[in-house]
Image: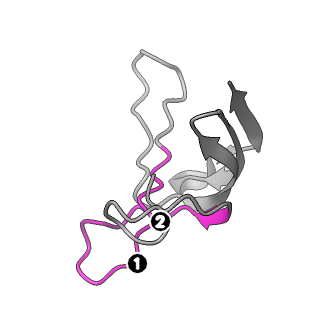
Amino acid sequence: MYTTGYGALWTGELGDVDVSCMEAVPGANSTGICPYFDPDGPGGVAVKSAFVATGSITINQLDDNGYDIVVNEIVHPGGTTIAGFQLTGP
């Protein structure tokens, strides 16, 4: 998880993080949050690229005791939109 720029820079900060998967672009401010989307699971429809998706996630907890991450609305090219959902666990 990279939230302060691409690389091993995450220090445990919580809060909102923009989707920005631009590490291949020199000088780009990438967070390394790259949400790929496979609309039909293992099937014939191609996986949607993460590199031009927009949106954000909210990290409420991510440590040895568990995780609580909210994926806010993500918009992929062509208008595919993924409504928000929450991931939690011990």
Q: Which disc, if any, is residue 29?
A: 1
Picture layout, residue 4 above or below residue 14: below
Q: Dot 2 lies on which element? A: loop
Indicate which disc, 2 or 1, sits on the residue closer to the N terminus. 2
Secondary structure predominantly adopted by residues drawn in magenta: loop
User: Label 2, on which residue?
Assistant: 20
Q: Position of residue 44 (x, y in %)?
A: 39, 19
Point out the image quarter for the C terminus. Answer: top right
Q: Between residue 9 and residue 41, name the one nearer to us.
A: 9
Q: Position of residue 54 (x, y in %)?
A: 58, 62
Q: Position of residue 69 (x, y in %)?
A: 68, 44
Q: Amino acid at mark 1?
A: Asn
Taking the view exactly as shown, the residue that stands out farthest to the front is 64
Classify mark 2: residues with Cα within 10 Å, few (<14), some (14-19) or many (20+): many
Which of the colour schemes (rainbow, by chain, secondary structure, one colour) is used?
one colour
User: Which residues make up the magenta segment?
Assistant: 15-35
Are the residues flagged by discs 2 and 1 in contact, CB closer than 8 Å? yes
